Amino acid sequence: MTDTLNQVLAQADASLPRSLERLFALLRIPSISAQPRHASDCRTAAEWLREDLASLGFASRVAETPGHPMVVGHQENAQGPHVLFYGHYDVQPTDPLALWHSDPFDPRLVTEADGRKVIVARGASDDKGQLMTFIEACRAWKSVTGALPLNVSVLIEGEEESGGINLLPFLKANAAELHADVALICDTNMPNRTTPAITTGLRGLVGEEVVIECATHDLHSGMYGNAARNPIEVLCKILATIRDENGRVTLPGFYDGIVDAPDAVRAQWRGLYPDDAETLGPVGLSLAAGETGYSAIEQIWMRPTFEINGISGGYEDDGFKTVLPARAMAKISFRLVPGQDPLAIRDAFRTRVKEMLPPDAKIHFAPHGASTGFAVPADGPYLAPALGALTQEWGVPAVAIGSGGSIPVVAEIKEALGIDSLLVGFAQSDDRIHSPNEQYGVESFHRGIRSWVRVLAALAQG
Amino acid sequence: MTDTLNQVLAQADASLPRSLERLFALLRIPSISAQPRHASDCRTAAEWLREDLASLGFASRVAETPGHPMVVGHQENAQGPHVLFYGHYDVQPTDPLALWHSDPFDPRLVTEADGRKVIVARGASDDKGQLMTFIEACRAWKSVTGALPLNVSVLIEGEEESGGINLLPFLKANAAELHADVALICDTNMPNRTTPAITTGLRGLVGEEVVIECATHDLHSGMYGNAARNPIEVLCKILATIRDENGRVTLPGFYDGIVDAPDAVRAQWRGLYPDDAETLGPVGLSLAAGETGYSAIEQIWMRPTFEINGISGGYEDDGFKTVLPARAMAKISFRLVPGQDPLAIRDAFRTRVKEMLPPDAKIHFAPHGASTGFAVPADGPYLAPALGALTQEWGVPAVAIGSGGSIPVVAEIKEALGIDSLLVGFAQSDDRIHSPNEQYGVESFHRGIRSWVRVLAALAQG
């Protein structure tokens, strides 16, 4: 196998110029899913991918949904496990267009001040560049061996950037066809330029809006101040109790079921992010504000949190108005880790608010989503081989990392197909995804392809 | 004196129709001080009043200011103390005009469903109707006795409704001319339709804006939630500490120097407002929210308070955004009673915020005014005679009441001239001042005139 693997890697190296050409062709299609005028471009991107997969021997089709279409492909192999690769061909809008240094859909190679070569275009990193690392790895395998080393299905959607609601129903409706042993996703970052990583933890989210109403209308604070209940003060007093002086959430049962990452993993994280001041420096902060006893990266990657995402009430404009408002509103959220029950936590929050609600105050709640946290089991059959493959490619021990955010597809694949996902990504934090001058390092692309070549081999061998 | 007084009262009764005609003439002048296109109307109102005062034997003039002019008049008497009457001829804008049932500057008499006759026009109550009660009382005295029973100066300004800044400099520049023993002001309410009152306490105000900043820019709550300090939470935690569970302000020294109203006065208030649920019912509330142990009206009339007048931060629009904001803002105020030092209280608030400010958070303060509370001394030489005169007129014991709000002229007269003010008013809470269909009861106008006839007599006798 080693000889074959080396040949496939050499093929990937040799064909890099043509791999870039194909990526550039895909980047030229302005497949902005959020903008109806680009609907036909989304379909063009789907067709382009279907043809490209077909040229690699995939049985591929463009599958309709109520929104933008999916691309589905399958290629069987006599042996090995079955992987399902997920990516998305749609991209973010390009505004503000004036801040781009070149046409976002005219991709170009740019050499940075530090000598790095980057691909600049909308979607270069998120997700066209990343998804093509996988397809180009398949191409290298086919080119050298005439086959893939294991069974591969591919699902590429077109609504990831526009809050699409069609993926979960599609997964459920096609569960038999799409079933595999493990999902592979290429839509995440490396923690730095040299350390490969698999994101094995994602936080869930419970969002909630709470409105407190007291008087029937805004009052003059001179006429009623003191005697009439102030809903802003009520709201502040309630929200002030949600976390204690050690940054811990005080809702009963909030931390039930949580298991922190193993010491060995946390030690790796400390190696990557030894200093909170350095971790938080880029946003103007220096100290981790959450639970004491956890570093900033631990607070983000493996601990749940409470955030106030917005608050409003009374007079917010310039100057001053002696109003005693009738109403105050806050939007809050909890980021959840595996083990926590989003609905139980929503209930606990609502119970706290109701318990603290003074007489004469009324309350309205509005839910804004509820999803569980997610973790790839450290002892599963695919994580260790994949980490090993990445370590071999990059020459640096690959790390299992967390992510503070949510990637809904991971939960949806788990729900519809019952399988875990390995999030293997090569993006960098300065790729400017969703922003003007989005870029993807040529090294990310090249070594991403090589990484997938190795990961496929490793998973095939088990 | 009693015979004379009865003759003057009879004259006031007999001339009520002509008194109303004169008030209507003044109400027809659209003297809206806030709207530049009505500047000449303001001058017309000032000239009208100057002429009317002159017709009563006042040495009167229209005095220029950088804004709308003042009307000043003097009439000496061989004996008795010297009073300075203050009123304002300017009125509020009339919008929304569509909600008026008749032209706001075409005054008319309307009979209410309960049989009450009311004068409907902009300024009917605030303040043309009220100020004319005093002038008509003077007219009745002149008509019967050929003189006023004491020395009277009159100052009528034209910028009360538009945040005028010219009154205090004018008072200071003309302090010698305007000096008197006591000021009389007719711009306040009766507590109900039958009980006459003098407002002897007014609250001061300290306004403050506080901005908390943490990160240099808004963050993704998934990427940073927990580790990056949330300025809304910081703000809520600070504001939640300002009042304790008993509604008392917790700032050190906040209550220093405060003297509650005497028991006898508080007993009168309880007679007027026996039930908090009734006091607060019109605004949809039922329980006093301030310091325990004080009724709603005591909380408003004689106790200081803390209010959050506005708050904002993060995402406030429809839906949800997982933002961790960089900035949060609140506008707060304290209503003050006599004895409290506004600047010391501002300092105490700022100290609290600074003490609670966590690492990495920055703070900005902006002051929005600072004024002291005001009280007419209960043992002064003018309050008791004035209350007695009102009691005689209305047949119900007159009450010394408080007011939750501020009336800046009272503090300005005290500052510039060194004298206290007696706030004697006949407006009702349903006069709809500042709103469409402003009205003033014919009874308020008629018995207001009779009340001033008696008050002038009582003050003349000392």
Image (cartoon, coloured by chain):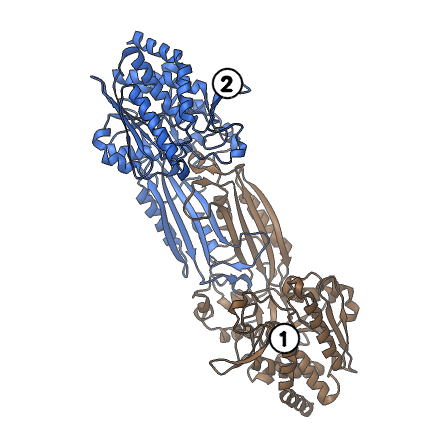
Chain colours: A brown, B blue
SS category of the residue bearing label 2: loop
> Could you tell me which chain the residue with mark 2 belongs to?
B
Residue A1 or residue B377, whichever sits in front = B377
Mark 2 Cα shell of 10 Å, populated few (<14), some (14-19), many (≥20) = few
Image: B146 above or below A62: above
Q: Secondary structure at mark 1?
A: helix
**In-image side of A263 versus A181 (left or right):** left
Counting from the top left corner in percent of width and height, residue A340 is at: 62, 59
Residue type at tag 1 = Leu
Q: Quadrant of the C terminus of chain A?
A: bottom right
**Mark 1 neighbour density, 10 Å: few (under 14) some (14–19) many (20 or more):** many
View extreme (top): residue: B3
Nearer the observer, B396 or B348 = B396
For residue A55, above or below residue B195: below
For label 1, the residue is: A27
Residue A181, placed above or below residue B360? below
Q: Is residue A357 above or below residue A412?
A: above
Residue B20 lies in what quarter of the image? top left
Residue B264: percent from left, percent from top: 36, 23
The N terminus of chain A appears in which quarter of the rendering?
bottom right
Query: Going by the picture, which residue comes out furthest to the bottom?
Result: A3
* C-alpha distance separating marks 2 and 1: 79 Å
- Image x and y of residue A257, in percent: 61, 61
Q: Are marks 2 and 1 in contact (CB under 8 Å)?
A: no
- The picture places residue B322, in percent across and down from the top left corner, at 56, 59
Residue A13 lies in quadrant: bottom right
Q: Residue at x 29, y 27 (%)?
A: B377
